[in-house]
Structure formats: structure tokens, C-alpha cells
Image: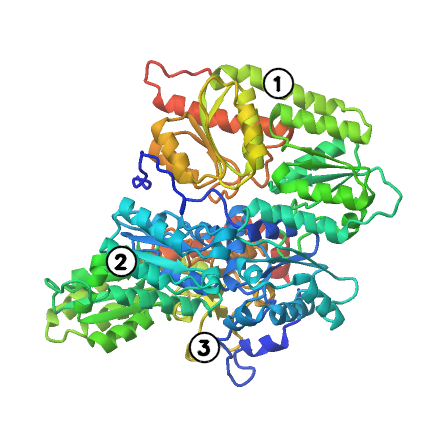
Amino acid sequence: MLLRHTPTEIKERKALTVNPAKTCQPIGAMYASLGIHGCLPHSHGSQGCYAYHRSALTRHFKEPVAAATSAFTEGASVFGGQANLLQSIDNIFTVYNPDVIAVHTTCLSETIGDDIPQIVAKARADGKAPAGKYIIHANTPSYVGSHVTGYSNMVKAMVDYFSTSTGAKTKAVNLIPGFVEPSDMAEIQRIAEVMGVPYIMFPDTSKVLNGPLTGKYKMFPDGGTTIEDLHMTGDSKGTIALGRTCTMAAARALDSKCKVPCEILDLPIGLQGTDEFVDKLRLMAGVNVPDVLNLERGQLVDCISDWHQYLYGKRVGVVGDPDQVLALTRFLVSLDMKPVHIVSGSPAGKKYVKALEEVVADIGEEVNIKVPGDMLLFHQWIKNDPVDLIIGNTYCKYIAKDEDIPFVRHGFPIYDRMGHSYFSTMGYRGAMRLMEQILGVLMDRQDRDATDITMELVM
Amino acid sequence: MSSIPILKSREAQIHTKGEKPFDMTCGKHSVAGSVSQRACVFCGSRVVLYPIADALHLIHGPIGCAAYTWDIRGALSSGPQLHRLSFSTDLRERDVIFGGEKKLEAALDELIDHYKPKAAFVYSTCIVGIIGDDVAAVCRKIEAKKGIPVLPVHSEGFKGTKKDGYKAACDALFKLVGKGSTEGVSPISINILGEFNIGGEAWLIKEYYERMGVQVVSVMTGDGRVDQIGKSHGAALNVVQCSGALTFLAEMMKEEYGTPYIRVSYIGIDDMAKSLYDVAARFPDNPEIMERTRKIVREEVEAILPELNEIRKDLEGKKAAIYVGGAFKAFSLIKALNYLGMKVVLVGSQTGNKEDYKTLQEMCDDGTIILDDANPLELSKYIIEKDADLFIGGVKERPIAFKMGIGFCDHNHERKIPLAGFRGMLAFAREVHTSVTSPVWQFCPARLGNKEK
């Protein structure tokens, strides 16, 4: 019982987070930066920050993650990090030669008060940034928001630095994915492709963090949104942003900067979530939904009908990032399941909580919701009121094991299973995969607990 | 991949043995803008103290530092699992403005009441150093109130390198040493220092010493307990593993309590045997200890030798690259790999000192690349150039090796089985063998091309 220390009695904790369901802004910014082609993320802070972010991303994706650091010393934290960043810019372009450096700050450099644009301007004036090379930045103080905020800030920075309007609109639709898997980004693109919609996705970590074995180490893998495409986002006819907490800021910025109208949707997880996405994309691009998508949709509905008796009434605990939690909860409710304990580690605002409450309003049970909450509270709820299924990141495995509850891994981080970066849980097909995972663990449990008499062959 | 630019300021940290006079520049702060594989002061402190399983580990700072270090190291405990939870004051913007002392005090108050730990470590992170919270004062206050040691760890990330973090951890540990009674501590006794019980290694090592008839008073910090550390000053000898992590503590204990120390390594047959013999030699009045030691070594080696010899047949002549945290580990790995018939073509470390590199240079063949604080481009360039078959490193290096189609062995946080000790040597050999001879590499076209050339 690894979590034997978890008390059943729930006390209000003000000063303390135990077993966090979130992490800090910079890693989100780093992940988003990796979705630009030829970009080296740069952490303006101590050496530990970026080492931890790289390790965490590597554990999750099982891929090399390159990033640089300003390597703050005691001197830098007294006199400011300008000298470090100037030297970094010089060294990075000399040695690694990326097309873009995406600088994100840390709690340290934020508190010292380094002014990144001013330092970058000085680097340019000193001739340390070659022509045709870009340096973008996002402020990502670790003590504000969480990793999803950092992602959002860096995606917005892409708009601030790159999006330009030439006055001539293209037929392309901008697709802005939230902090999701490379496989999810690829699936969203596939849907746009089968619908015949020209698109620009940013950021795009597919083929960056799920690349092939080639026999070579590439610091800058093949994938990622190109600079050219990022520039052109300002001419697109519209933007569809998927997952509010991660993408709304960028979509709105693009609207006000380049007059590109936007639709901000939930993540396309499950039937309704995907329907909404496909519908908005259809309307924005002026296309029809092709047979192939109708087929996939029909297959998903068919699967739900085939298996609904195994899903009906099952009680679920969901923990994760706000956008995922909302979309997942909605899908679970549509499957006639009952999400009864819901935690987002990240703060997400009152509107968000209200949306979540509306989704579960009619499930006929009291629902625990805590935003932001942590995994200790989540575990306490489950101890007091057990569930049939847990959905969350790898850290939920402790709870699942101690309480002997079936568990589906979803979200970030997943350190202990393969699949997430290759097989999407978005779109109609992704929904089928998610169902397969959920049904798999539920029915394995039924088989495990069956007696010789009740063991069923056909399910 | 043929040529990559090497920074001028990095040139003195990369050497090819035999090319020019050897003078390694090391121990310096990483160049800003580098993609170094190193970490920070906090990381150093956290890895050293983390395995103390009945202590509370509270990380004072924004959430990240606690989130990234939550149970990522397989430092096993045979009892309490408190160290595997993640506690953070989760500092927010208003705390940064108004200070985090109150929050810290409240958190400690609550945690100590609930979990009843034997001691509490409070880690300072970067931000705490900047906003100037008086962590030591809060710790003193809580210590007086709760009656357990509450120890500040001065591990602000920017205050140096990972090594400085080891030092900060040792400073905190040293405050626990001497707190307990030495009753029941035998004159024939040791402390095992710098063994973190990753994959259960400390248990293996401890068992060897106990079979020799030597009492192990404490292991610092693998499967560590506050009370054991408290009476560790009663031991006759400190046996220190790893380049730097716990040497600071050994020095402090030598000064304060007169406890002598020796440096050992438990990796590979020769070094493992030497670690036992060196300890036995410290108790010359009890010749039976040496006798038992010989017996243990003989038995243990005999038990693993047949399979090792089989493995060696497949590995003979294969080439290995090593990039590890401490250089001391690299010495042992070179010997262990040589024992398996492998040749080391590249060796580097994150924290080696001048002497370490001199030793490395003496151990290696001509043409071996030796580097300090390397980046992935340098590592991949030389590994391809030297046509290595195996890369030994940590979490960030693993996927780099695999991308190049090269076998890998994690000799860091993520080893799952003991690689130390005699049985550990066999496990190491099996792991190396499995990875180097994996059929997957035959599907890696670039690697095949390289071989055919």
C-alpha cells in the first residue's frame, strides 16, 4: 500500500499541495515550442528547470528532447540574466543553428524582472542574431497558472511574433490544438485532410515527438509548423481552437491582430466533441462532410450501441488537465457512465467549473468537483466513495493499485505505457480507441472477479 | 553528422586521448546557451536526501520542483514510503510578493501532525533564495514546537552545480548525525555512504558486509532511516561510494567524530571485491573477517562466472560509450565493460574533477574521446564516429542512443534491477547483452550502412 498514508478524513488545506495534478508553466512552453519546425526551446533560468522538463518530456514520449538554458548563476540572479541570455543567443546560433529560439522565462528570471524583448533587441543590435533567424519569447512564471498556461502563453507568442496579414485571405483554416499528444495533432490534421480543407496547424509536435528510428540523432526533427506557415496564419480565413485553456489566448490574439475570426471549441474527444469540430470546420471551409468521416462516425455509434450495457452506470473518477477533463467528462456522460469525482490540477476559472457542472448536472448523483485540486484529495474522495474506473495520468496507478480499481491512462504525463503518442484519442476513431481501453480494463476486471460459475465466454 | 561546430569555450572540455597533452577543464559552470545534460543544486540535494523514507520532504517553491521529482528515482524502502509522495508549498504569485514563510509554517505544521515523520527536510528552490524567506528561522520554530529535527536544505537551484546540491544535502544530514545514542554499535562497524538503494542495491551490499561479520550502522541514504543516521557517528568506518555526493559528509564526520573513511565502488567484480577486502583490512585484529570475505568473494564470483563467460563471447570486441553523472562510476564501468570484452571509445561525466579525468585518461586506450559536461550533438557525433555498439547513460541519453540504432543501458535513476554487487554485475552483463545483441538493430538501415563501410 504505497499510499497507506492517505487519510480518509478530508481537511481543508490552504498551504499545501500533496501529489500534484499539475506542474509549472515552463514545461508547457517547451512542449509548444517543440511544435515549431527547427526551433530550439530556451529556458531562461537555472540549469535544473530545463533538465527536469527535458527528462519529463523524454519519459513521456521516449524521444530525445533538445532545449537550451541560460544556466543562471548566483551572479545572474543578483545582477539580472541579461548577460546569460546574450551569451546563450550567441552560442545557440553558433553551435546548434536553429531557425528559431523560443525563450520562456522561469520563476527565477521573472522575479528578478528580466525584460526579454529588451535583451533580444540588444542581441540583434550587437549582431548576435543572424538575419533570417527568429527569437520569440513568452513569460511563463512558474507561480502563475500551470503547465497548460505555459503552453497557452507560448502558442500566443507564435501569433504575436509570426502571424502577419497581407490583406489577401487564403482558403486555409488555422487549427490550434491544446496540450495534446502528437498523435492527436496528427488525427486532427487527418480529419481536415479527408474533408479537403487546407489548414495550418500550430503548434504541431507530430513527427517531432513520435518520430521514426532513422539511425541518426536529429536535434531538429522533420515535423513542426514551418515559419512560413506561421507567418501565413494571419491570412487564413478562420481559426478553430481546440481546448479553451490552452488555445483561446492565441486564437483571440490572431483575431485582434490579423482579423482572423475564430471558433473556440472543446477538445474533439468523443462523439459530440468531434461532431462540433467537424461541423465548425465544414462551415468555416465551406465543404461537405465526406463519406469516409460519416462511416467512422457510424462505426463509433455502432460500437457504443454494441457495448452500452457494460458502460451503463459505471462510476468514474477523472483527473487531468482542464481541457481534457471537460471533454472526457462529456464523453463519459454520453456513454451513460457517471463521472463522480473530478479534479483538474490546474486553475481554470469559474466559467470552466460551471461548464463542468452543467455536463454532469443530470447524471443523478452528487458529483465532487475541485479545480484546482490535487491527487491526495482525489484519492480521499475515492476512498470514501469508490468508483469502477479511474482515468488520469500515470500517477493514478498508485491509487488504482491501492484501491484495486481499473485504470485507463490519459493525459500528461504517461511514463509507464506505450501508445499515447502514436494512437490518438481524438476524433471518431480516437473515441473508439478510448472505448476500447475503457472496456478492456472493465471487462478484464469482470473476468478476473468471475467465479468458475459466472465466467462468461461471450461478452 | 561529419562535422559539428564545437564552441571555443568547450574545446578544453573535450579530449581525444593521445592527441595532445591532457589537461581537462572541468568543474566549471555550464556555458549559457548550452544543451548540457546537467541539472541544478536542488536536484543534487533531492537525489541525496530523497531515499530517507521516514522523513518528510517538503519542497518550498512553485509546484514544478516538487512535480518533477515525484517518485522518479527507484530508491527502494523496506518500510515507510513517505519519501515517495510529493509535498509542495505550491507558491503562487501573492506568496512571491508577500513572502512564503507563513505558508511554509502552516504546511509543516499540518504535515508533521498528520504524517508523524522522524524528521523533516525543507528544500529551498530558486525563488525562495530570491524573495528571501528565512527558511532556517521557520524550521527552528517548528522544530521547537514539534520536537523533531526540521532541517533547512539550502538548495536554491542557481547557487552552483549539482555538486553544490550534494554539499547542501550533506550539511543537512550532518545535523542528524550524533543525535542518537551509540548503544549497541559494535566496534566492528561501518556506515555505507553514497548508496541510494536504486533497484535494491543497498540491500545486496549490506548483506555482504553483514556476512563478513561487520555491523552496518546506517546506509546513507538508501532505505535510510533518521534514527540510523542519528547513531552513525558510532561506526568505526565510513565507506563512501560515488564521486562526490557523500564525500562531504564523510569529511565532516572525520573532523567532528574522527571517523575515518575509504572510497569504494560496488560496480564490477574487481571493484566490488576490493570494497569488501578494503573494509576487512580495517579490522586486522579480527582475521576471521578477512577469511569470511575471501569466502564470500569466492562463492559469489563462482556463482556468476559461468554465465558471464557465456555473455562475454557475444560482447567481445564490441564498443561502448559512457556518459554518466559522476566520474567515479565511469572508472568502475570501464573495468566492468573491459571484463566483458568490450572496449570503451568514449567516456564523459557531468561532474568529474581534474583528478577524475586524469584517472580516466590513464584507464583508456589511445583514441578514446573524453569529455566533460557534453551536449547531445557532441555525444551523437562521437558515438557515430567511433561506431559504438552500446551507450551507457541516463534518462535523457536513452532515446538518443536508440535513434542512432545503438544499444543502451541506464546506469542512473531508471535502472530497475541492482547493477551493483556481484549479482548486479551479472544483471548488468545481461542487460548490456540484451540491448547490444537485440534483433531490432538489424532493422536500422543507417546503422547497417555504417557497419558495411
The amino acid type of the residue labelled 3 equals: Tyr
The amino acid type of the residue labelled 1 equals: Val
Q: For the residues carrying marks 3 and 1, which lies nearer the camera in this image?
A: 1
Q: Chain of mark 1?
A: A
Q: Quadrant of the N terminus of chain B?
A: bottom right
Secondary structure, mark 2, is: helix
Between B143 and B370, which is closer to the camera in this rendering? B143
Q: In the rendered image, which residue does mark 1 sit on?
A: A301
Q: With respect to residue A401, does A100 lie above or below? A: below
- Residue visible at 87% across and 48% down in the picture: A166
The amino acid type of the residue labelled 2 equals: Glu
Quadrant of res A261: top right
Q: Chain of mark 2?
A: B
Q: In the rendered image, which residue does mark 3 sit on?
A: B357
> Does any portion of residue B209 appear in the rendered image?
no
Q: Residue A118, image x and y in percent?
A: 69, 65
Marks 2,3: beta carbons within 8 A? no
Which color scheme is applied? rainbow
Secondary structure, mark 3, is: helix
Per the rendering, the mark at residue A457 is none
Q: In the rendered image, which residue does mark 2 sit on?
A: B143
Q: For the residues carrying marks 2 and 3, which lies nearer the camera in this image?
A: 2
What is the distance, in whole Å, between disc 3 and disc 1 at their CAs? Answer: 65 Å
